[in-house]
Amino acid sequence: MADGPTITTIAERAGVSIASVSRVLNGLPTRQETVRKVMAAADELGYVRNAVARSLKSRRTHQVAFAMADVGNPAYLAMLRQIQPVLKAAGYRLVLHSTDAVVADEIDVLHSLGERYVDGLIMVPLRVTEAHLEMLSAARAPVVIIGQVPEGSRVDNVRADSHTGVGLAIDHLHQLGRRRIGMINGPLDTVPGAARAAGYRQALADVGLPYDDDLVQIGDFYRAEGRHAVTELLARVPDVDALLCANDLIALGALDVLRAAGKRVPRDVAVVGMDDTDLAAASWPSLTSVSLGSAERGKVAAELLLERLQGGDREPRLVTVPPRLVVRASTAGESDAQGKGNLE
Amino acid sequence: MADGPTITTIAERAGVSIASVSRVLNGLPTRQETVRKVMAAADELGYVRNAVARSLKSRRTHQVAFAMADVGNPAYLAMLRQIQPVLKAAGYRLVLHSTDAVVADEIDVLHSLGERYVDGLIMVPLRVTEAHLEMLSAARAPVVIIGQVPEGSRVDNVRADSHTGVGLAIDHLHQLGRRRIGMINGPLDTVPGAARAAGYRQALADVGLPYDDDLVQIGDFYRAEGRHAVTELLARVPDVDALLCANDLIALGALDVLRAAGKRVPRDVAVVGMDDTDLAAASWPSLTSVSLGSAERGKVAAELLLERLQGGDREPRLVTVPPRLVVRASTAGESDAQGKGNLE
């Protein structure tokens, strides 16, 4: 909004108060002289009036919805931070839906596209059910799905590649000489949990390490659950020398447990997180983490949606954003990366 | 949404697909038999159809806007996480505006209330200008301001009390025996910067410590700026024994600089942040921080707005949410709070 004419610049040009400009443009009773000045200034500056009248005429709402499980999750927040400016620059308002990963709520969001309260939707479902697919095929506005949808779905789709991401982490740990690499995962019936489990098996095979059930612990994607899972794994395999954690919160839980157990990080146990959130750089030692490109996925999703909104029909597109390993102190070999033990 | 009847529960009751229910409720062509089943099930379950038709009749949009400077800021995020469920439970959608703290953008949001695209607005302006006050007095929908507005403003207002919050931190540091307590602040022409500066002066006087210009460094509310400011202050006052930082990001920057300088935290220098974000618990040592009740302020603001939306006119209200000191390892005296130096 700051780029084009605003009511602030119109008020300056017309030499009247901002509130007066607002009254005139909103059609409220105002002195004739003020109306004349404001309209002249608005015309000179090329101000386009009355978004509502425009949207009634065009049957457009100039709103786009973003639906995700939990606005508190830093990965969704990273998406939101990229989606918001892309839409704002194109003149769209952002409607936010937090679905708590409840399928019925997600279906309701898809259904209410029929009410035409938005022109399009970006959605991040945690699991894609049959009901999702049914609703997507009947959706009355363009939809972009961030996440995994079955092959052949007629919908724009932006994906992470956590399978490859896990591989980058295992490769890194293997190169550092680690041979007993544990995995702390979230539930296997979620898309991320399943992909990371498969990636772990594959990556071990690729570097020639055996798969060992004892080195795998399933918990949930939170710090407290991470603590619990790492405690179990440590009790079972005291000489584990690396932990791949399925997200950064789990990895923070791992650092807590290792610290309390007197294990040095990374000398005794190297730790890797996933998602590369702000928390990774805030922790100490700072956390090596697999970036799954949340920000980039948000940006691509917003751009795909704008293409549909502005350009109309085309074949559905699938964009996979490649992962990237961000190496920090929790795995880095050099001792000087760790500071000088300056904590009492 | 999950509580009342949804299209998922209607589909179950009617024995048809979710997509069919969606088509019927959205008025799309469907077999007569299906229409009959769906309508019967919807009536039985007490489903209220067609939010758009309702809103045309009632002239309500069932949307509420939340406008803040930057969705990436954890303090705003903490508000958003509370605002969202309160509004959702009352049947309102949330429209998100990120204004980048640009006054013209904030004014534009207030102006567009005249377009009636939302029923109400919650706004967090970084500075309240004359233009804000003008627009507020002319606003065509209920507005709740989170932040400082001048006395006598006719608007619902939810405030933090960072002046008192700074006092809690100084008191705590003084009780721990610290006598050279530095302050790293953000710009003084912002509401938070000014309030924290005044609180610092007052709190020093209250505990009987002299105010010393050398102990104050102004930077900005980010980690890199925090690092820079702390470096300057350390060069000037090498024996500073505590740092009060105007937010958690600055405090993380302080930890970086102290670590690199070989200063032990908290033994040599105790560190306190403000805002008590997720980053405070993620850092190591974990960060003592002044909670200014961001989450609580969001919740109160949403409730005040709902009161107006549902109950109509009443006198404007002012609610001040009291601060709270959350003590963690960066100031805690006991050495066992610090772990055993398990980092190489």
Image (spheres, coloured by chain):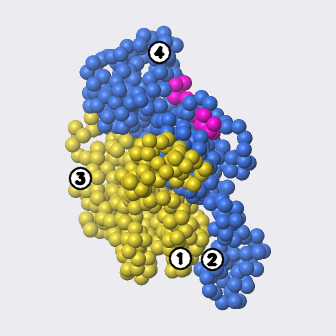
Chain colours: A yellow, B blue
Contact between marks 2 and 1 (CB within 8 A): the answer is yes
Q: Would you say B238 lies left or right of B314 here?
A: left
N-terminal of the pair, mark 2 or mark 4, is 2
For the residues bearing labels 2 and 4, Cβ distance under 8 angstroms: no
Packing grade of label 2 (10 A; few <14, some 14-19, many >=20) is some
- Frontmost of labels 2 and 4 is 2
Q: Nearer the viewer, mark 1 or mark 3?
A: 1
Give me the C-alpha separation between circle 4 and circle 3. 51 Å
Query: Could you tell me how far apart the alpha carbons at marks 1 and 3 are, in whole angstroms?
Result: 52 Å
Q: Position of residue A130 (x, y in %)?
A: 54, 78
Residue toward you, B326 or A309: A309
* Chain at tag 1: A
Q: Residue at coordinates 54% horizontally, 37% vertically from top-left?
A: B133
Mark 1, Cα crowd under 10 Å, few <14 / some 14-19 / many 20+, is some
Residue drawn at (54%, 80%) of the image: A138
Instruction: Kindly identify which residue carries mark 3.
Output: A176
Amino acid under disc 1 = Arg
Viewer-nearest of labels 4 and 3? Answer: 4
